[in-house]
Amino acid sequence: MKNKKVKEFLLFGLFVFPAVAFVLFSTGIPFIMNLYYSVFQWNGVGKSMKFVGMDNFVKIFTNDRLFWRGVRFTLKFAVFYVIIVNIVSLAVALVMSKEKKTSSVGRAFYYVPYIISLTAISLIWKFILGPGFEALYEITGWGFFNWSWVGTSKLAFYVVVIMAVWQNLGFYMVNYIAGIIAVPTELLEAAKIDGANGIQTFTRITIPMIMPAISICMFTSLTFAFKLFDIIMVFTKGGPANSTVTVAYNIYQEAFSNNQYGLATAKSLVFVLFVLAVTAIQMKITKSKEIEA
Amino acid sequence: MMKKFRRVNWLSVIIFLCSIFWLLPLILIFINSFKPYNDMIQQFLSLPKSWKLDMYVETWMKFEFPMLISNTLLYTVTTVLAIALMAPMAAYKLSRTKSRFSGICFILIIMPMMVPFQSYMISLTRVVASLNLSGTKLGQILVSTGLCMPLAVYMIHGFVKNVPYELEECARIDGASNVRIYFNIVLPLLKPILTTVVVLDTLSCWNDIITNQLIVGGSAKARNIQNALYMQFSAQTSDWEHALPGIVMSMIPALIFFICMQKHIVGGMTAGAVKG
């Protein structure tokens, strides 16, 4: 009897432990080390680690302007990104789901940016906004093309929003199309017979019926916005003059540019709690609005 | 009848034009990659005078593309194989074993989906450095396998529930061992979801820049194609004559893969949507 249990456990270990080991190596252990480092003052390379208790956290909340600037930027980005990407992708999805034949090609075009790498995306936009706009200014003479898009803080913000929307729109569009196609046609026909016009059908039937898709898209776009890091790291590097530093990028800067390792890990813990709290609230709100078909 | 036909066509035309507009940045990159720099500025929108591949060949040689491509392929293939081997095994056993320990293991594996990568990446570089793996190819492979694991296990775990348990029982009565049951009966049935996982992970490994930057950043020998392009061309003044062919060449494999695997990618995008 005992033998059988041991055998069972060995089998379980054979199947499951390799996966567990990999996950612990690349995420579990680093996360626990984060907890440990966050109460030290340390530069990340030297031997001297000074225990400072909660000082790192106190510092974040009282005396860290760049971090809070990052929070403001991230929130502002989240508002713009979530609204724009969801409205545009829903609109595209509505049109696409009406027209079956051409839309499969069209759909593919929309999600091509989603499958190319961030390096390519950032270099592409650097080229378009640099030499490209210069050339277009020569041709058209529109002042719009002559603005310093990457060089001024205000415009750099919009460039980041546009790049993020351009890259990810296809993902949300696919989710919305899946939702719209699943709306039963009887409901739409019944509404038509009852004399509802296009707008009424959309707000009273389509929207409530695709609420699951909306909640998934809102959820993913919000978490994407809070975690915004890749585009900043590869494209703006936080510039000009730290105006596009996000929370995640600030953590990275703190660790690798300022060599404030302990402070950076403390910040990343604050960041995790912040992201988890917001997503929990948001999940609750959207879940309560979903209805049964 | 005729009228209806025309109206439908117009909608298609509009959809098509909008889609082209969406891809305009890519199209402009492609046509400009064949031009010398002066022509890029002076004839930005027109087709190149000749479709000569000179700059492509030069970029290929100058930036050691054969090495970069073989590195990137090595990372992608080994990571995907490791995932395809381990993730379904773990997901299958976790789904079939109903014990508290199994539940804890499952939560341990999928937990990273909730926690943003940016919050533990700095300590990850410490872990890798303490094992003397930073700057090595092995380090990159181990890390990217670990990072791809949670979503893969999660997606397959959901799918295992649809695999009928009766089949396994029959095989057991016929005297097949557990390992044999898994490889001969369960694994073939997991093929649809496994394809999706493989396709998603292939793309994310090929396109990866952040982990490559963090793990092998300094060592030129272990860079993948995305990281090398980033290191070469992200400086303020860019050498566009080489950068554009480089970008195009780095995208071509991903685009071909995308065209072949379109269905799975779209399916995977909606299936993976729960990732936080």
Image: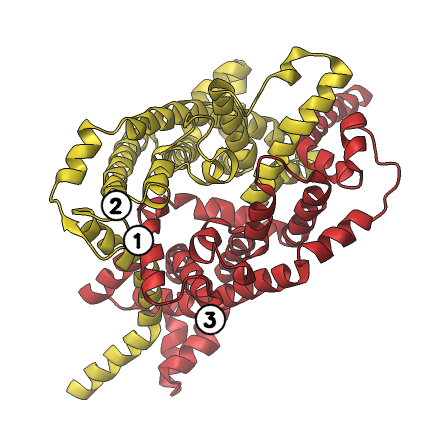
- Judged by depth in the image, the label closer to the viewer, 3 or 1, is 1
Which of the chains bears the disc numbered 3?
Answer: B
Q: Is residue B236 left or right of residue B271?
A: right
- Per the image, label 3 sits on a secondary structure element best described as helix
**Which label is found at residue B123?**
1
**Which label is found at residue A265?**
2
The three-letter code of the residue at mark 3 reads Leu
Q: Is residue B196 above or below residue A229?
A: below
Which of the 4 image quarters holds residue A33? bottom left
Asked whether residue A199 is in view, the answer is: yes
Q: Position of residue A199 (x, y in %)?
A: 51, 15
Rendered hue of chain B is: red
Q: Which residue is at the front of the view, B144 or A233? A: A233
Q: Residues within 10 Å of mark 1 (few under 14, many from 20)?
A: many
Q: Is residue A142 above or below residue B110?
A: above
The residue where tag 3 is placed is: B187
Which of the chains bears the disc numbered 1?
Answer: B
